[in-house]
Amino acid sequence: MSQPTGLQLLTLTGIVHRCAQETGLFFRRQSHDPRYCFELFRRAVEERDHRAWEFIHAQYHPLVAGWVNRHPAFPGSGEEAQYFVNRAFEKMWVALTPDKLRRFPNLKSVLRYLQMCVHSVVLDHVRASEQLAVNVPVEALAAAGGASGSSAESQALARVRRQEFWDSLQARLRNEKERQVVYGSFVLALKPRELYDQFRETFRDVNEVYRVKENVLARLRRDAEFKQLLGQDT
């Protein structure tokens, strides 16, 4: 069994303090030692130390948020930067195993991997949104009452189809949280933060709103019958 190195003998508080100091030196373009931050990642990943991971989230949150805001696909995503920041850290936490970390020679390579996680979650979200069946009826709802000059028969048919859609959708929602998220997102056009502000008594935090929304949309995307109702190929 290998003996712990000098860095590994330091307390987590000491590692966090030095990581913050060295990061500050890096951004000021001064000489710095990245080993302390790399050790913080090692403890989070190899030892599954949740406190170390919390410190990583706090330490690198501004950096990741900057990557999100500068991503070319972000402006058209319809989400807040915080959403992708959380998803990127979650993706890294799940995907970065101890064996994979050992293949990274230094902090720079770990941060490059984190940046790749940002790129991945933004693109995955945009691609899913482009294929999302729910967006089709929402556009119809925005034109409730029918277009100007349309016949009475066309307006009546549109109302019937909208009702059929909502009846079908409601039957697929499992609880009140899902109903509030769908209504707030696709009828009121609220972002998750705004939706949470409207229904604070229902949701623990804005992250729960994100999770409920993602679960509903993922379930609908897998629902062949629902996609068929929207006239989409399965």
Image (tube, rainbow, N blue to C red):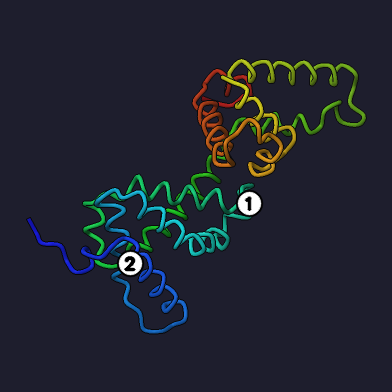
Q: Which residue is mark 1?
A: 76
Residue 23 drawn above or below residue 69: below
Q: Is disc 2 in contact with disc 1, using a CB cutoff of under 8 Å?
A: no
Residue plotted at (77% across, 15% down): 160
- Residue 86: x and y in percent read 49, 49
The residue lying toward the viewer, choosing from 96 and 76, is 96
Which residue of the protein is positioned furthest toward the bottom in this rendering?
Answer: 30
- Residue type at mark 2 is Gly
- Local crowd size for mark 1, using a 10 Å CA cut-off: few (<14), some (14–19), many (≥20): few
Nearer the viewer's eye, disc 2 or disc 1? 2
Q: Which residue is mark 2?
A: 14
The residue lying toward the viewer, choosing from 197 and 14, is 14
Q: Which comes before the other along the chain, label 2 or label 1?
A: 2
In this rendering, would 102 be left or right of 13?
left
Whole-Å distance between the Cαs marked 2 and 1? 41 Å
Which residue of the protein is positioned furthest toward the right in this rendering?
Answer: 149
Quadrant of residue 200 in the image?
A: top right
Residue plotted at (86% across, 26% down): 145
Q: Which mark is drawn over residue 26? A: none
- Residue type at mark 1 is Gly
Residue plotted at (57% across, 24% down): 227
| SS for dot 1 | loop
| SS for dot 2 | helix
Q: How many discs mark residues in the rendered view? A: 2
